[in-house]
Amino acid sequence: MRRRSRASSKPTKARSRKAPTPKRRTAPTATRSDKAPVADLQAELKRQARELNEALNQQAATADVLKIISHSRLAASRFS
């Protein structure tokens, strides 16, 4: 098939091939087996975060109790 170009009066050939697909569209998508280690690691990190949060809450509660004890001893020693 021939057609004329607008820029010049020379006949040009129409494209018979498609342009190559960009690489980002041809890259393989992650499969379940690729995602499994990431999911395992994420689950482990969430478990560790929960444990650390529980430990922090326990330490905060212990600090509160120690403050109460120290203030009660100070108050008791002032009135003795």
Image: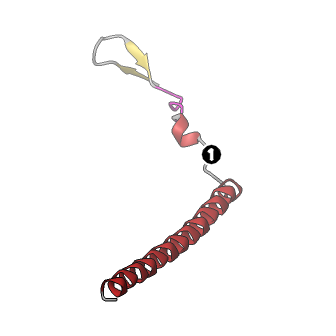
Looking at the image, the residue that sits furthest to the front is: 80
Task: Let me know if residue 47 is in the magenta part.
Answer: no
Looking at the image, the residue that sits furthest to the left is: 7
Report helix, strand or loop for mark 1: loop
Q: Is residue 32 left or right of residue 80?
A: right
Magenta stretch prevailing secondary structure = loop
**Residue under pointer 1:** 28
Q: Residue placed at 28% from the left, 19% from the top?
A: 6
Closer to the camera in the image, 61 or 74: 74
Q: Which residues are magenta?
A: 15-21
Task: Let me know if residue 17 is in the magenta part.
Answer: yes
In the rendered image, residue 10, in percent from the top left (x then y), is placed at 36, 10
Q: Is residue 54 above or below residue 18?
A: below
Q: Residue placed at 50% from the left, 73% from the top?
A: 59
Closer to the camera in the image, 22 or 49: 49
Q: Is residue 10 left or right of residue 56?
A: left
Name the amino acid, label 1: Pro
In which quadrant of the rendered view does residue 43 lie? bottom right
In the rendered image, residue 19, in percent from the top left (x then y), is placed at 50, 30
Q: Residue placed at 57% from the left, 66% from the top?
A: 46
Closer to the camera in the image, 29 or 72: 72
In the rendered image, residue 75, in percent from the top left (x then y), is placed at 33, 84
Closer to the camera in the image, 5 or 72: 72
Q: Is residue 3 above or below residue 26?
A: above
